Image: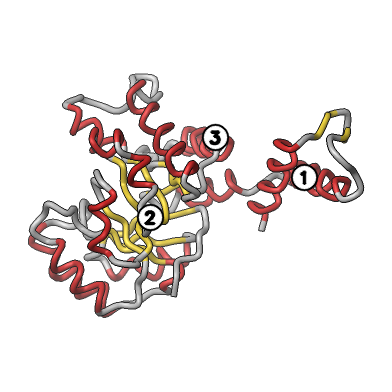
């Protein structure tokens, strides 16, 4: 069964099966993490847990270990024993890195300098389902110290990679996922960033804490006013030829597309 895209994603450590069900209940899509969230000594137990405590494959992704780790082969064997069809691949740097996953749906993580430079190539891969970018691994790969300035804003290079990932994904018809918000208690900051992700064109946003999921959902859900406008535009478009006026604004092809996207997000 294939993954069904929804906007609010949530990481859960692969070695914490006691959290699987709650994570699935609280989010749209769960990412069972075998990489950063699991120590090397616990990865075998995490694989066993993923096999022994199955979730809905249409709402679950497994983040495997990177291609250059000693763990990927065992991760692939584990996947063969599950019904999961979607994998998140860390530190993707070439489309050929993804061929080992066959016809599985791949969410490629852009989190190195080489991955950022090759984002369009990766997005064009035949089994690429989505791109996501990661700030802290990127900064570490660049040799930097922090991804954000003192005021919480992204550094210029990080904003560039965020934009490049979005552009590459959309250019090739893939979903684009915005990176995590690391400050668990700062929901206002998360809300601002999630709303920016929506208006910029991201398909969804990934979270590391259940507290963040409702904020992300609210950001991606159109307001009643937005939905009323979009439905009104689309209804009137059925009777018009070419551009037309609606509520004092000229409606042409780009705004029609915008209205369609608002209605799609609402459902």
In depth, the one of 8 and 17 nearer the eye is 8
Residue position for label 3:
200
Residue 159: % across, % down = 39, 27
Tag 1 or tag 2, which sits nearer the N-term?
Answer: 2
Q: Quadrant of the N terminus?
A: bottom left
How far apart are labels 2 and 1 at the CA level? Answer: 31 Å
Residue 118 or residue 227, whichever sits in front: 118
SS type, badge 3: helix
Please tell me whether residue 138 is drawn above or below residue 128 in the rendered image: above
Residue under numbered circle 1:
230
Q: Nearer the viewer, residue 66 or 183?
A: 66
Where disc 1 sits, the SS reads helix
Residue extending farthest to the right is 239
Nearer to us in this view, 27 or 102:
102
Q: Which residue is drawn at 88% across and 33% down?
A: 245
Residue at 23% across, 38% down: 137
Could you tell me residue 57's position as x and y percent? Answer: 41, 72
Mark 2 highlights which residue? 128
Question: Around disc 1, counting alpha carbons within 10 Å, would you say few (fewer than 14), some (14 to 19), or many (20 or more)?
Answer: many
With respect to residue 207, does 32 lie above or below?
Answer: below
How far apart, in angstroms, are the residues tagged by discs 3 and 1? 18 Å
Q: Nearer the viewer, mark 2 or mark 1?
A: 2
In the rendered image, the quadrant that contains the C terminus is bottom right
Q: Residues within 10 Å of mark 3 (few under 14, many from 20)?
A: few
* Among numbered discs 3 and 1, the one appearing first in the sequence: 3
Determine which of the numbered discs, if any, sits on residue 239 in the image. Answer: none
The residue that appears at 80% across and 42% down in the rendered structure is 229
In this picture, residue 64 sits left or right of residue 215:
left
Local SS, label 2: strand
């Amino acid at each position: 069964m294939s993954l069904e895209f929804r906007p609010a994603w949530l990481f859960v450590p692969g070695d914490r099966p006691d959290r699987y069900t709650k994570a699935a209940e609280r989010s749209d899509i769960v990412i069972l993490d075998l990489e950063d969230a699991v120590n090397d000594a616990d990865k075998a137990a995490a694989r066993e847990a993923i096999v022994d405590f199955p979730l809905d494959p249409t709402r679950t992704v497994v983040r495997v270990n990177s291609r250059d780790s000693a763990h990927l082969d065992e991760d692939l064997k584990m996947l063969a024993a599950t019904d999961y069809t979607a994998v998140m691949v860390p530190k993707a740097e070439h489309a050929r890195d993804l061929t080992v996953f066959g016809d599985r749906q791949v969410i490629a993580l852009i989190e190195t300098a080489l991955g950022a430079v090759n984002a369009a190539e990766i997005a064009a891969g035949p089994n690429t389902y989505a791109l996501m970018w990661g700030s802290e691994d990127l900064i570490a790969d660049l040799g930097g110290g922090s991804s954000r300035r003192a005021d919480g804003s992204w550094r210029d290079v990080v904003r560039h990679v965020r934009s490049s990932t979005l552009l590459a994904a959309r250019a090739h018809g893939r979903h684009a996922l915005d990176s995590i918000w690391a400050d668990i208690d700062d929901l206002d900051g998360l809300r601002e960033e999630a709303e920016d992700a929506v208006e910029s064109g991201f398909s969804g946003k990934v979270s590391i804490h259940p507290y963040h999921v409702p904020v992300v959902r609210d950001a991606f859900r159109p307001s009643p006013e937005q939905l009323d406008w979009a439905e009104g535009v689309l209804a009137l478009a059925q009777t018009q030829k070419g551009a037309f006026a609606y509520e004092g604004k000229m409606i042409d092809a780009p705004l029609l597309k915008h209205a369609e996207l608002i209605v799609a997000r609402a459902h």
